[in-house]
Amino acid sequence: MNGPHFSVRAALALADGQPPPRVAALVAGLTSSKRTAWTQIASVAGTPQPPGDAGLTRLAQWEQEVLPVLGEAQLLARLPHGKTVRDLLLEHHRELLWTAGLIAAQASRVRTA
């Protein structure tokens, strides 16, 4: 989320001025996905629920506090659809990187009126 080169933060830094509407949509989708993933994780791993009013930045900060606390048993806990918490976190990480690339591509486009 916060790496210096290949992260959502680095991709958002490419936007000069008002970001394109597509960037806002990607950020909103990622925020929703992150909240959904952590709500599912909380249901089986006993972590706190993600803050419902948090935007992407605050949600990512919250995630960085909760993630290191997960133990091996929590990472191996199965969600109702059969995946482990570890699998869900890996999928979410891939989505995060993919979305960062999409944001970077949209943010660096020159906008004309």
Image (cartoon, rainbow, N blue to C red):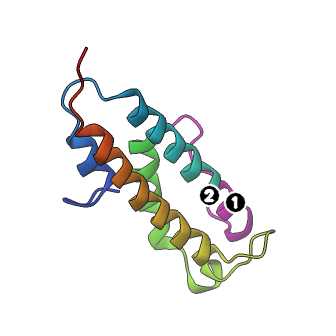
* Residue 66: percent from left, percent from top: 49, 63
Extreme-right residue of the structure: 80
Alpha-carbon neighbours of circle 2 within 10 Å: few (<14), some, or many (≥20)? some
Q: Is residue 43 above or below residue 59?
A: below
Given residues 71 and 26, the one toward you in this image is 26
- Asked if marks 1 and 2 touch (Cβ < 8 Å), the reply is yes
Q: Residue at x 71, y 75 (%)?
A: 83
113 in the magenta segment: no
Residue kind at label 1, given as amino acid type: Gln
- Residue 31 lies left or right of residue 106; in this view the side is right
As helix, strand or loop, the secondary structure at mark 2 comes to helix
Residue 55 visible: no
Segment tinted magenta in the rendering: 39-55
Residue at 47%, 57% in the rendered image: 63
Instruction: Determine the residue positioned at 30% across, 57% down.
Output: 7
Q: Is residue 27 in view from this perspective?
A: yes
Residue 57 percent coordinates (x, y): 38, 43
Residue furthest out toward the top = 113
For image coordinates 66% across by 54% down, the residue present is 39
Q: Front-most of 41 and 107?
A: 107
The residue carrying mark 2 is 37
Q: Which residue is mark 1?
A: 40
Q: Is residue 73 above or below residue 7?
A: below
Residue 58 drawn above or below residue 112: below
Left or right: residue 44 versus residue 92 is right
